[in-house]
């Protein structure tokens, strides 16, 4: 496969010199690990104390988010689409526990489905299961515990919220991604999403679940789901990711004394990820893939598979996805070569998107003394522009 992701000119075509400089200083700061650790602690305190927060936080928010609300995001959506890169509006408010907050997330998801229906540049809507219901309820159901009468009433509301967003997505013909979260709540979410696929994926994949391939049990899960889908006559939509909660997963397994659900090594996760991609590409007659990854090798592998099997680059059953503010070298070069690509564009009040931003900051700190991927790409483009 021709190596296309090193083209930083295509990657950063939408960034002015000033914007590129800003991104450079941001990643330089993030790259300095102790600062991120101190920074996140101080930031959390500042936000809780309602202190005005400026500087680094503002820069981080601007870099990784589309705005405070969905309308703020539209200028970014349109700009990215001039280069063929689509958007997924992601209401990134996390960790809420109240019924009103779940209803607010429901309303927001319905709004983004409507936005997506009206705009070619927004091919998917997305939500998180714990955005629509209490984490502890999913956990209890996953552990096969019986809910109390009150909890059952509460869970019925979660079911109704799921059904409403999925039926609207189906009615409006907007594909809907449902994020994956911690393994100890995921079983209940998986059952629920499978019910939604059964109901709304009869003609084509509209509802997409997420498989976190850092879990060693997920390929088997996919194969079993496939058997079920064939028998019952529904399509599978799946976002394939590696998974974002590794430390938490390992710590909990250790603390509670059960075997870790995470693959034994990074290499094992990589193999597992690529195996799931292969399995799905081989069964595209009944499946659609959203490959959510910043991993260049996995992305090249999927492109290669498509070429080998004579699948068109813009086949609507295969989408590539990255996060806004990261891996533009992958997104923009994929789009320039005619592939379907969409970036998650997070939005929400600054206070509420902090857990999301902290995950991004931690992800972008240097690994084993190497400069982070983002920083080296930005450096390369700055040098190219200076004629170095
Ligand atoms: C569009 C999009 C949507 C996403 N949606 C979700 C979601 O719904 N749920 C979710 O959990 N995450 C989600 N993510 C985040 C994703 O799971 C990864 O955390 C992130 O993308 C980094 O993985 P990578 O494939 O890009 O690449 P890489 O940088 O190659 O892989 C890093 C990942 O490998 C795994 N890993 C690292 N070290 C080890 C080790 N020692 N042993 C085993 N595994 C290891 C971890 O999963 C780590 O995040 C999403 C990402 C994108 C781009």
Image (spheres, rainbow, N blue to C red):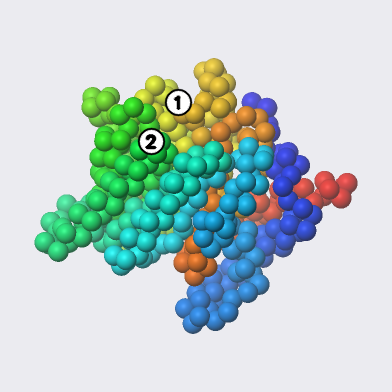
The tag earlier along the polypeptide, 2 or 1, is 2
Asked whether the viewer can see residue 47, the reply is yes
Residue 132, above or below 208: below
Q: Secondary structure at mark 1?
A: helix
The structure residue drawn at horizontal position 35% and vertical position 65%, both measured from the top left corner, is 101
Which residue is the site of mark 2?
206
Most foreground residue, 153 or 360: 153
Residue 329 image-quadrant placement: top right
Asked whether the viewer can see residue 254, the reply is no
Q: Position of residue 335 (x, y in %)?
A: 63, 35
Most foreground residue, 277 or 175: 175
Question: Which mark, residue 24?
Answer: none
Please state, as top left, top right, bottom left or bottom right, where the N terminus lies in the image: top right
Most foreground residue, 17 or 276: 17
Which residue is the site of mark 1?
281
Q: Is residue 123 left or right of residue 222?
A: right
How many C-alpha atoms fall within 10 Å of the one at disc 2: few (<14), some, or many (≥20)?
many
The structure residue drawn at horizontal position 54% and vertical position 56%, both measured from the top left corner, is 71
Q: Position of residue 110 (x, y in %)?
A: 39, 50
Residue 81, above or below 362: above
Q: Are marks 2 and 1 in contact (CB under 8 Å)?
A: no
Q: Position of residue 105 (x, y in %)?
A: 38, 58
Name the mark nearer the viewer: 2 or 1: 2
Q: CA distance from mark 2 to mark 1?
A: 17 Å
Residue 139, above or below 219: below
Residue 228 image-quadrant placement: top left
The structure residue drawn at horizontal position 23% and vertical position 24%, both measured from the top left corner, is 231
Q: Secondary structure at mark 2?
A: loop
């Amino acid at each position: 496969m021709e190596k296309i992701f090193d083209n930083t000119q295509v990657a950063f075509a939408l960034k002015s010199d000033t914007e590129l400089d800003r991104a450079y200083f941001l990643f330089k700061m993030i790259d300095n690990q102790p600062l991120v650790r101190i920074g996140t602690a101080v930031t959390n305190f500042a936000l809780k104390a309602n202190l005005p927060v400026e500087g680094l936080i503002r820069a981080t928010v601007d870099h990784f988010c589309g705005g405070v609300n969905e309308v703020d995001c539209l200028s970014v959506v349109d700009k990215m689409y001039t280069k063929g890169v689509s958007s997924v509006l992601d209401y990134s408010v996390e960790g809420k526990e109240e019924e009103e907050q779940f209803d607010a997330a429901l309303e927001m998801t319905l709004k983004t489905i409507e936005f997506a229906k009206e705009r070619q540049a927004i091919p998917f809507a997305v939500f998180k299961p714990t955005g629509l219901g209490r984490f502890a309820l999913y956990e209890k159901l996953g552990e096969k515990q019986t809910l109390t009468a009150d909890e059952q009433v509460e869970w019925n509301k979660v079911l109704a919220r799921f059904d409403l967003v999925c039926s609207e997505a189906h009615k409006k013909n907007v594909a809907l991604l449902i994020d994956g979260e911690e393994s100890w709540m995921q079983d209940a979410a998986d059952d629920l999403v499978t019910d939604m696929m059964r109901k709304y994926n009869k003609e084509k994949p509209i509802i997409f679940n997420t498989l976190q391939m850092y879990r060693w049990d997920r390929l088997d899960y996919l194969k079993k789901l496939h058997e079920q889908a064939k028998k019952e006559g529904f399509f599978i939509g799946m976002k394939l990711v590696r998974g974002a909660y590794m430390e938490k997963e390992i710590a909990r397994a250790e603390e509670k004394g059960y075997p870790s659900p995470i693959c034994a090594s990074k290499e094992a996760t990589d193999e597992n990820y690529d195996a799931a991609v292969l399995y799905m590409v081989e069964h595209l007659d009944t499946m659609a893939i959203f490959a959510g990854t910043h991993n260049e090798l996995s992305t090249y592998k999927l492109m290669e598979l498509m070429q080998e099997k004579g699948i068109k680059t813009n086949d609507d059953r295969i989408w590539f996805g990255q996060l806004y503010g990261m891996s533009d070298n992958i997104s923009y070069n994929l789009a320039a070569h005619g592939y379907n690509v969409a970036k998650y564009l997070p939005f929400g009040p600054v206070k509420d998107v902090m857990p999301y931003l902290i995950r991004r900051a931690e992800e972008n700190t240097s690994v084993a003394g190497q400069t982070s991927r983002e920083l080296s790409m930005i450096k390369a483009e700055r040098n190219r522009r200076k004629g170095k």
